Image (cartoon, rainbow, N blue to C red):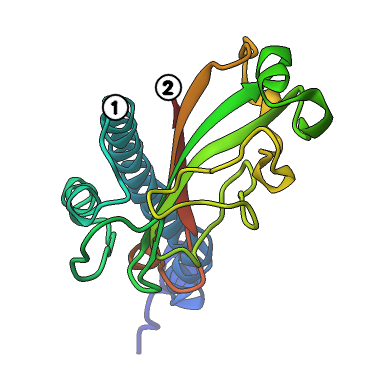
Amino acid sequence: MRKPYPRPVSARRRARQSGQEIIEFGLVTLLYVPLLLGTFVTGMNLIRNIEVTHVCRDLGNMYIHGADFSTWAMQNQAARLAVGLGLNVGSSFAGNQNTNNTATGRGVVIVSQVTFVGTPSCTAALPASCTNQNQYVFTQRIVFGNAGLRTSNYGSPTGAVINSAGVVQNPVTDFAARATNFSTNLQTQLNDGQFIYIVEVYFDSPDLAVSSLSPGGVYSRVFF
């Protein structure tokens, strides 16, 4: 009886290595799946960043041209500009509100007007009572949306006397009206009586989270 020919070496090697490709694929997957998910989250958050930046610039342009964001009509207009981002301004209200904290939604808008208190302003207010000489102070602050998401980078006039339209009543003499961490953001410092308009927006991004990968939120600011 003739003995069967032995199988080629390559065939015997393939038989011993059966399933190796699956193991290699599994090992590669452990690396590339998180990389792919991270690329997706980062890319989508970049798109969100561009959207938020455009909203911030539009609101800043409206603010410097006289928009009164202490009214519900203008806050609702801001929510329409931020459609799809989740800015909730609640139901309508009459008159003015310097803080409209809905405590819901995914966004918050912080509108501020800041000035520099120099010698002329102090002289007009009597030097003895010029608490804020050579300081940057808030002259207006309005917050609407989910105020619990984020605070301003420049402090808050909490404790200062502010009317319903967000106007600080005594910016020259009220210590609580001081802005913080502000002068370092200006290439050219303000002179006495000059104003700068600031809009800060923040939008949370829970819809872009994938498993343990979370982009957090997107913050943007604009100075006019």
Tell me the residue that label 1 is attached to: 61
In the rendered structure, find residue 224 and report the number of the disc placed on it: 2
Gap in Å between the C-alphas at discs 2 and 1? Answer: 8 Å
In the rendered view, would you say 182 is above or below 33? above
Badge 1 amino acid? Asn
Badge 2 amino acid? Phe
Q: Say whether disc 2 or disc 1 marks the residue closer to the N-terminus.
A: 1
Task: State the residue lying farthest toward the bottom.
Answer: 1
Residue 194 percent across, percent down from the top left: 53, 16
Residue 219 percent across, percent down from the top left: 47, 46
Q: Do the residues labelled 2 and 1 touch (CB within 8 Å)?
A: yes
Q: Which of 32 and 202 is in front in this view?
A: 202
Residue 100 percent across, percent down from the top left: 37, 63
Q: Residue at x 66, y 38 (%)?
A: 179
Q: Is residue 98 left or right of residue 173?
A: left
Task: State the residue lying farthest toward the right.
Answer: 128
In the rendered structure, find residue 28 and report the number of the disc placed on it: none
Mark 1 is surrounded, within 10 Å at the Cα level, by few (under 14), some (14 to 19) or many (20 or more) other residues, namely: some
Where disc 1 sits, the SS reads: helix
